[in-house]
Image (spheres, rainbow, N blue to C red):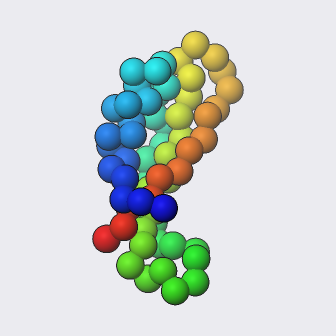
């Protein structure tokens, strides 16, 4: 795991034809003993297809 900027991931994904349809920032970690870790949950839709591409990035505070 490493710090990642969810908005940068959205920008990078856009260059590959993926559009964000969900962005949830600062979600608490479900991993034990990781109180200082938050998650950004992202869902992308391929602009050329109807299926959803799901991804997750970690933002460490």
Q: Which residue is located at x 49 percent, y 36 percent?
A: 21
Q: Residue at x 44, y 30 (%)?
A: 13
Up the image or down, 24 lies above or below 16; here it is below
At x 37%, y 48%, the residue is 6
Q: Position of residue 43 (x, y in %)?
A: 54, 41
Which residue reaches farthest front? 2
| Residue toward you, 39 or 1 | 1
Q: Can residue 25 be seen at all in this image of the molecule? A: no
Name the residue nearer the viewer: 4 or 27.
Answer: 4
The quadrant of the picture occupied by the C terminus is bottom left
Question: Does residue 12 appear left or right of residue 49 in this picture?
Answer: left
Residue 47 to residue 31: above or below: above
In-image side of 49 versus 9 (left or right): right
Q: Is residue 32 left or right of residue 18?
A: right
Total numbered circles? 0
Say which quarter of the image contains residue 31: bottom right
The quadrant in which residue 11 appears is top left
| Residue projecting furthest to the top | 48
| Residue 33 coordinates in the image, percent (x, y) | 52, 86
Q: Position of residue 16 (x, y in %)?
A: 46, 21
Q: Residue at x 56, y 44 (%)?
A: 55
- Residue 6 seen from this side: yes
Relative to 49, is 39 above or below?
A: below
Q: In the image as oriented, which residue stretches furthest toward the right?
A: 51
């Amino acid at each position: 795991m490493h710090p990642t900027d969810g908005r940068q991931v959205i920008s990078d994904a856009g260059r590959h034809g993926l559009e964000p349809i969900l962005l949830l920032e600062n979600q608490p970690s479900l991993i034990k003993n990781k109180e200082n870790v938050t998650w950004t949950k992202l869902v992308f839709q391929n602009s050329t297809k109807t299926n959803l591409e799901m991804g997750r990035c970690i933002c460490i505070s």
